[in-house]
Structure formats: C-alpha cells, structure tokens
Image (cartoon, rainbow, N blue to C red):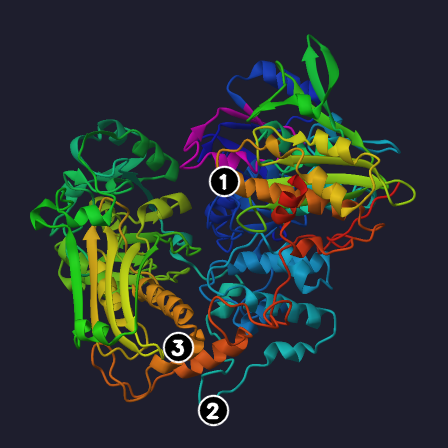
Amino acid sequence: MLRYDNYFIPKSLDEYFNLLTEVKDYRIVAGCTDVLPWAREGRAGNVFIKNIIDITNIKELNIFEIHKDKIKISATTTFQKLFIDPQIRKDIKILPQVSVWFADDQIREQATIGGNIVNASPAGDGSPAFLTLNAQAIIMGRKGKDIYERKISLDKFILGRNKVDLQGNEILAALEMDNTKGYGASFEKVGHRRSLVISTVCVSCVARTDSSGKLFDDVRIAVAGVREIPCRLEKTEKFLQGKEINEQNILQASVLDLDVINARSRLEYRKEVLQNFIIRAIIKSVSEKIIIKENYFEKTKIQKLEEVHA
Amino acid sequence: MHKLTINLEVNGRKINKEVNSHYRLLDFLREDLDLTGSKEGCGAGECGTCSVFVDGKLVKSCLMPVAKASGKKIETVEHQGTPDNLSTLQKAFFLTGASQCGFCIPGMVMAATSTLRNNPKADIEEIKEEMGGNICRCTGYQKIFDAVELARDVISGKLDPKALEEYSKPEASYLGANVKRIDAPGKVTGRLKYAADMKMPNMLHMQVFRSSRPHAKIKKLDLSKAKAVSGVEAIVTCDDVPGIDNFGVFIEDQPVLAKERVRYVGEAIAAVAADTLEAAKEAVSKIEIEYEDLPALYDPEEALKDEILIHEHYKTNLVKHIPIRKGNVEEGFAKADLIVEEKFATQPVEHAYLEPMAGLSYVDSDGTLVIVSPSQNITHHRHMMSKIMDLPINKVRFIMSPVGGGFGGKEDMIYQGMLALCAMKTRLPVRYVMTREEDITSTAKRHPSRTNYKIGITKDGKITAVQIKMLADGGAYGCSTEGVMRKAAILGAGPYKIDNLQMDTFGVYTNNTPSGAFRSFGALQTEFATESILDICAEKLNMDPFELRRKNMFVAGDLTHTKQELNSASIGTVLNELESLASWEKGTPNSRGASRKDLNGKDNRDSCFLGARLNEKPEASGGVK
C-alpha cells in the first residue's frame, strides 16, 4: 500500500521547482500506473513517502506540436493520445502502433511517455519506438531563479536499468522527434498474453523505400526486452541502406545484430523471436510497394538462416 | 491520517468531501461513497474489475490517486442502470448469461460501454481489443462478446430491441434452453454485495502476520509494539482459541493460527483487528518474531522417506494412500503385445477466482457467532467452527456471501477461524479482505503430481493391464488431500474398460503451500497421464487415437474401475463430437493429416495481432520516399 501525507499538483514550473526546495522526502509522479502497483507485497510492500508531486498539470509542459520535420510533445502526453490523435496516426505511424501494444486502453489513458522513459525498464515499450524517431529528450531545470533547458539524444539519456541522465532538480519535459511522414512502420511484441503484458521481446521499425519502390532508402530498427538498455540495430540498418528489397537481403540483414541480446533468461528463444521480428518488421514497414515472392510468415526462418550462414 | 478536500461529481451528484489523502479513487468510491459496484480484483491495474469513467475516459480506479480525480466527472457502474431499468448492454449481458460469478461483470459492463461509446459499430476484433484490459475467469469470454455484439446491433437499429427479451420457455427440459438467470440483474448493475462490499457500524479491519519461513519453530513472538499502535483493538494468536485448535476437511491437522511452529511460507501466525486498515497494517509490521529454522521438505519423494516430519506426532508424512485392485495386472501384462512405461508430472495451479478471499464476522445480540464469507462448504465449516470456538452448533451461524468465483479454492476453510476469534475477542464486527498477492501466497493450490504409468496393450489396440502410481504434494496441511486422492484413484484410469488395474494414489505432507480442492478434484492429474499415454500407444501401434479409444471405451452395462454398473456412457458421443470439431483427419497422433483441414479452416482463429482500430492493416504500412 502506498501511503503519503500530501499530494501536490503544481500548475507551473516555478511552483514545481519551489516545491522541490520546500519539501523533503518526495516522489515525482505522472500517470501513477507504475508507482501504485510497485507499492505492493512482493515488490516494495507498504511504502510511506511524505509528499507526492504530480507533474501532469504543469502548464509549461502542455506541449503538442507537429511540424513538417519534427514533432515536439510533452513528457506528460499519454499513450492513448498517441493512439487516437488523427495527425499522429496519419504521419507518425509507429506511435499508434506502439501504443496499441502498450498496456491496455484504460492504462494508456493515464500512463505517460515521460514516465515510461524515466522508469527506464529494460522491457519498456515506448523507448524503442522513440529511438527509431531519433528522439531528443528535452530536459528542464532551475539554477537559482533561472529555468534552463538542455537537449540530449534519447539513447544517451537512458543510462541503465531505472537510471536516466537527470541531474539535481531536472525534469524530463518533452520529446522532440522526427516527423516520419511517408514512412511505413511496424511494432512487434511478444509476452505471455496480448493485452497488459511485459515484453519478452519487442521491435520497432520505421522505413521507407526509394521512389522506385525497389530499394531500401532509410530503415531504422530498435529493440527492447532483450537487454538492459533499448538500442538501435546499426549494422542491420547500415547494411540495408540502398540495397534492393529482396528476401536474401532481408535475411542477411536479420542476423547482423543478434548479439545485442543480453538477457537473463531464455536466450535461444529471444534470439529466434528477435530475428523473426526483425524480418517481419522490415517487410511490414515497406510492403505496400513491394511484392514478397514467398510467404515469410509460414516459413521457418531459422532454417533459412542456416542456409544464409552456409 | 492526513486528509485532503476534493470537489468532484460522481454519477451526476456534486461532492465536496474530506478524504484520506493516500486513497485511490477506488478506495474513495468503495469506502466513502459505498459505490461497491467497482471491485478490487488485483489492485495493480491487471484485472479491470474497478473500471470507471473519469471525464468520459475509462480508467482503472485502482491506479488513480483520489487527488487526481478532484475537479473531474466520475461515472461508475451504478450510473449505467438499475436492476429494474437495465441499460441495453446490461440487458444483453443478462440474456446471453454473460454474468456467472458476476465479480468481473461491473467492470466488463463499463469496458463494453466505453467500447460502444467510442465506436457504436465496433466489430468483434475491436471489441476484443478494447476490452483486453478486463479479465473474466468463468465464461471464457464468449458470452460476454456475444452480449456486446447483441447490444451493438440493437443500438445501431440492426436488431429489434425485442431481441433482448428472447428467453426460451423450457417445456420438457431446461437443458439447452436459455432460461433467465435470476441473479443477473443484481450482478450486471453492480448492486450485488460480495463479502468485501459489506460494511457494519463500528466495523474493524483485520490484517494477518504471516510466516516468512517454510519450516521453523517459533522461539519468540512479541506483540507489545503492535498492541501499542493507536486504533488496535485486538491481536489474536493460537493462545486465543477456546476450543479444539485442530481442523480440516478430512484430517484435523490444522491450527487456526500457527502453534509453536510454522510449516509453510505464508502461514498465518497472528491476526490484528484495528479500527482502520492502515492501523492494522502498521501493527502487523510491528510484530516481532524469532524463528529457529528446521530442515524443510519441498519434494514429495523426499517426504515419503519420513526423515523429516512435517507433523511429528503422526510419525509419517503420508496423508493418504488410496489403492484400487481389479483383476491381476501381471497376467494382463503377460497378454500384451506392447508395454509402454512413462512418467508424467503436473504443477501447482492457482484458482485465480476474480474475487480475492474476504469475510465478515460478528457476534449477534443473542451471542451467536456469525461468519459471512464466500465459502463453498458452509455446513462443514460451521461444524468445524463450533469445535474451534467451543460453541454449541446453534450458536454458530455461517452465511454464504456471493462467491466471486471459487473453482474449489473457497472449499477449504482458510481465514474464517481468525475472523471469528477477532469478533469474539472484540465483540465488534470484523472484516478481512485479502490482497491478490496475499491470496496467491497463502491459499491452497491444485495438487502438483508425479505419475508413473505402465500400460499393456494388444497389437489390435485392446488394453490388457494398467498400473498407475501417483504421488501428490499435499503441502503443509491435509486440507482436501484425502478426497483428491480418492477421486484421482477412482477416475484416473479414464472411461475405459480395463480388466486388470492396479491404481495407487499417495498424498504427502511437505513444506510447500497446502494443496486443496480444485475443479476435477484430482482426476485431472491422473487422466492427463492416461490420455497422454493412450496417444503414445496409438503412435506406437500405428493406430488412429480415436479408434484406439473407441476400442476400449465404456458402454452402458460395463463396470467401472470400482465395479459400479453404468446405466449409460457418453464417451462415444463425446469422441464423435471432438473428432468433428477438431477437423481430425484419420491417422496416428503424430501424423499431420493429408489435407490439413485444421489449418486456415472456419474454426481457426487468426494469429494474434493488435491494431484492429488502426487505419492500415497490421500486415502492411508501406513507406515510400
């Protein structure tokens, strides 16, 4: 059971930073969908924190801007907003795709993208999707009376399990990401069930072909669930750049980064799933314009993989 | 306790109230407003029994601090309809029989309402996807989905609202007829009160101090700091039991609260009754204990050696051995062309009823001890309680509250003794509601089993002899182990004619969580072995598995393994039905059939995907420069 004496909902950054200097023993929350299940038997148990500071009503954090090249959205944006917003659905297809796999409709109404990132769970679903959008974390802090802002790329912001690069009184304010209009996208995830499940493996992919529709132009893939920190698959991406879209190239690409897996359990399973997910995600992200000669979904990929190696 | 003031609207009613600052929206609705249609099945956002609308958006109220709800409009299941004026969705849930135990149903009604509000034309995939955050344990979901589709069609005008009243009037038989489930209106509207929903004036809250050790002597138990917590009315231990402190369904081996030693992790040692839940929890955290660890048993094979004894005075760890002897197995095996020997094992299983254990106890004006709980066996519990409390049977009353799913899990008496002790000691009503975690840790599970199987069979598929030995882990206390062993022995060899049968089932004590009653009561474990080995035999004999079973199945007039004559036998009908539903193609169990009618057929579901509400098909999103 989580117990606290005060629940603060500051309305401005100034009010927020003032609170941090006034109260001791506090925890910052947003959607609360992680902190409440955490304070239960088997995890943290009965927890008492004197002050809870809820950042979801800070007016300066009410950011939702979609520009031609970039989008800038607040850390307190809910996943359901990413799922239902018409512009996002049209142009940044990876965001509704990751959202539909994120928890369930009801939790998405509360859970925020900032909370998901700052929690830095190795199995977090949001980060790999944001990584494929070259996300920059916008961080705000206050020195004396001056509020400052700094930007850091998301892959550098996440330092490890439950660890991110926030110093002093800093807060993750927003994310700035690529507007991937014209890109296809695919989010692949597996866990013990369909809704409300922690990823065993998840893969995010955004990609587009060249204007002929025959060559890969830009492919970006990121994974989570298989290692401490989510990451992009750089060798795979580089290999595919400019290559013809065909079975051989996709299969060859799919094995290049399997060594990113560094999980505590079920290594072989994760490896097999990851490779299949990479193949499927690439195909789905570009498949409107290409004809896949054979049905990838019914074949045993691992067997094909051995042929590739031979 | 710290308070905060909130202003909000609940079901159209404006409310300005001081509440406990750490309350979740769910606590506020249930404890302060008595809107108990929102249930707490897990408290961790997993089950959806607490779903409510906040400013028109469906959320899980167990994940929302009440402070967040201030200034918002809340809508709960109580606002959706009343038993005499049901909403369209509620009528549909009523008609399709979607409410069984009913505990998940208020949340389901809310999730379905949200789904159809968001898209009145939602197709079945969208419905499944959007309701994915709500769990049901009884129905297998089909009746719930049927209800939502029915309501959708009525709302869209595709179906006449009269379709919501189409109950059949059974004349000859109730079998196969859709009769009105009379308890449904109370369930679909969230009006039915389960034990955790009940409240009495001056009611205390009970919390339990549990063992962290699998097997240990209790050297010292210090309650002084716990008793000093403000609000604590009583703390009970085994010393407070007035009568015979040994109970059990078959063997009376269990104390109400651990006596001198603990035998499993999660065993109750002391129970605190306090004026608030928070005070009771705080007191539990202040109980001090010293253990002297004893060697523990986790393996039933080890338990059979009796080197470590779980209950010393029994001189053995064997709870029950049930033998069945029929014919002569040696002669039977001699006649066989093929002998197959295999080992099978099954794991412990949690019942996972949606309603966690809960109960309320009080002493009536005439001194009668009353216990209200979702017990599946109240008469027996009443007899046990009369001995424990040293009260004549007419001074013990059990009231069965609605059971929010049991599956056998609420058959063994688990917490009612502690509640009764607290009520008797304080003479105040006492309520106890387990958390999901506590329920999973401390209550009985399905018996884990290990089965050694030997079967003799002729080359044309007639069983000549069967020898089965099953060893089950009964855990720390007897509970229903004896009965489970009996059923496992009687039914385990399956509905087949076996002239020579030697069946032995053994239940033993270990320091694992007690095993108890669970659907099929032991038959599942042994029958799993039987059906598996028959498939292995069919494979080895190059025979169709249905044919093999038909050659050996019971028919009317046959004698069962315990020599009862059967007036009828339905296994033949079941096999025919199964064969057709599975689109089975004749062949051995390991063959895959020539035309694979089982694949991509009408009865096959597409592979698992999400995204029914996305613009593009999940197969393709196609990006081009």
Q: Secondary structure at mark 1?
A: loop
Can you say whether B350 is above or below B220 in the image? below
**Magenta span has A31?**
yes
Can you say whether B506 is above or below B596 in the image? above
Locate residue A11: give its quadrant: top right
Q: Left of A82 or right of it: where is B358?
A: left
Q: Does residue B334 show up? A: yes
For the residue marked with disc 2, what is the amino acid? Answer: Glu
Magenta segment boundaries in residue numbering: A27-56
Given the current orientation, which residue lies at the most extreme right position?
A211
Q: Residues within 10 Å of mark 3 (few under 14, many from 20)?
A: many
Q: Secondary structure at mark 2?
A: loop
Q: Position of residue A201 (x, y in %)?
A: 59, 41
Please identify, in this view, whether the residue under mark 1 or under mark 3 is nearer the observer.
3
Same chain for the residues under marks 3 and 2 in the image? yes
Q: Left of B277 or right of it: where is B208?
A: left
Q: State the residue position of label 1.
A: A266
Can you say whether B495 is above or below B242 in the image? below
Q: State the residue position of label 2.
A: B171
Q: Chain of mark 1?
A: A
Q: Are marks 1 and 3 in contact (CB under 8 Å)?
A: no
Please identify, in this view, whether the residue under mark 3 or under mark 2 is nearer the observer.
3
Tag of residue B548:
3
